[in-house]
Image (cartoon, rainbow, N blue to C red):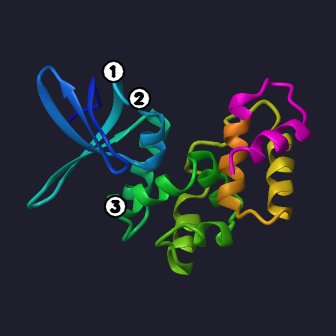
């Protein structure tokens, strides 16, 4: 019904936002990844999904179409995985990390996500492998650089989620031709 909302940010909290669109405030449930990228004030655009149930209407919003697509695949493609758990997943890991973990059948990584046990981790892999947007090219020009940097942070004792998030942020800050050493140094400031 709603593809996106574009309006002034009236409320911005970790679990939801309110967009003022033409004088009407739309409460939108959002993952932490969207919260982090949503401006504190001014105009924002959220790609939305309206969930209709017998006694409730919920509007979910995402900063990018890729996040919304992954959310929809989680909700529609995995049995017994509702919108609340899909938001928890997207709040815990980046879309790229989730896609990579599913494609590489990394059960240990998936089990580290809050609320995801052995059964759901295997179900995610079986039902979504090869169906999520590819992580290729999303982390930077040289994925081997990001993999090496994540590996270095893992060897320093950081957990995979922290390491991947720190490397993702570092790659945003650095130039395309940054060395692994530069990425690691910058990543350490984000953990």
Task: Report the residue marked by disc 1.
Answer: 42
Query: Which one is in front, 155 or 56?
Result: 155
Q: Is label 1 or label 3 in front?
A: 1
Coordinates of residue 27 in the picture (x, y in percent): 21, 41
Which label belongs to residue 190?
none
Vertical comparison of 99 with 80: above or below: above
Q: What stretch of residues is rendered in magenta? A: 171-191
Q: Is mark 2 on a helix, strand or loop?
A: loop
Task: Report the residue marked by disc 3.
Answer: 84
Is disc 1 in contact with disc 2, using a CB cutoff of under 8 Å? yes
Name which residue lies at 52% across and 63% down. 127
The answer to whether residue 158 of the structure is visible from this angle is yes
Q: In this view, does 36 lie to the left or right of 62?
A: right
Is disc 3 in contact with disc 2, using a CB cutoff of under 8 Å? no
Task: Report the residue marked by disc 2.
Answer: 39
Determine crowd level at label 3: few under 14, some 14-19, many 20+ residues with C-alpha closer than 10 A: few
- Could you tell me how far apart the alpha carbons at marks 1 and 2 are, in whole angstroms? 7 Å
Name which residue lies at 20% across and 35% down. 1
Determine crowd level at label 2: few under 14, some 14-19, many 20+ residues with C-alpha closer than 10 A: few
Q: What element carries label 3?
A: helix
- Could you tell me how far apart the alpha carbons at marks 1 and 3 are, in whole angstroms? 27 Å
């Amino acid at each position: 019904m709603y593809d996106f909302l574009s309006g002034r940010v009236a409320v911005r909290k970790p679990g939801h936002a309110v967009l003022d669109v033409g004088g009407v405030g739309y409460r939108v449930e959002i993952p932490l990844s969207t919260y982090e990228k949503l401006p504190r004030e001014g105009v924002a655009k959220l790609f939305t999904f309206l969930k209709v149930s017998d006694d409730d209407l919920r509007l979910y919003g995402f900063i990018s179409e890729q996040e919304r697509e992954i959310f929809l695949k989680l909700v529609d493609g995995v049995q017994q995985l509702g919108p609340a758990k899909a938001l928890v997943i997207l709040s815990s890991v980046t879309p790229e990390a989730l896609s990579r973990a599913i494609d590489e059948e990394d059960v240990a990584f998936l089990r580290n996500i809050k609320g995801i046990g052995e059964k759901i981790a295997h179900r995610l892999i079986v039902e979504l492998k090869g169906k999520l947007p590819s992580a290729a090219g999303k982390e930077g020009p040289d994925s081997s650089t990001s993999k090496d940097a994540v590996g270095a942070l893992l060897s320093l004792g950081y957990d995979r989620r922290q390491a991947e998030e720190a490397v993702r942020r570092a790659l945003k800050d650095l130039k395309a031709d940054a060395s692994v050493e530069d990425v690691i140094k910058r990543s350490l400031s984000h953990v």
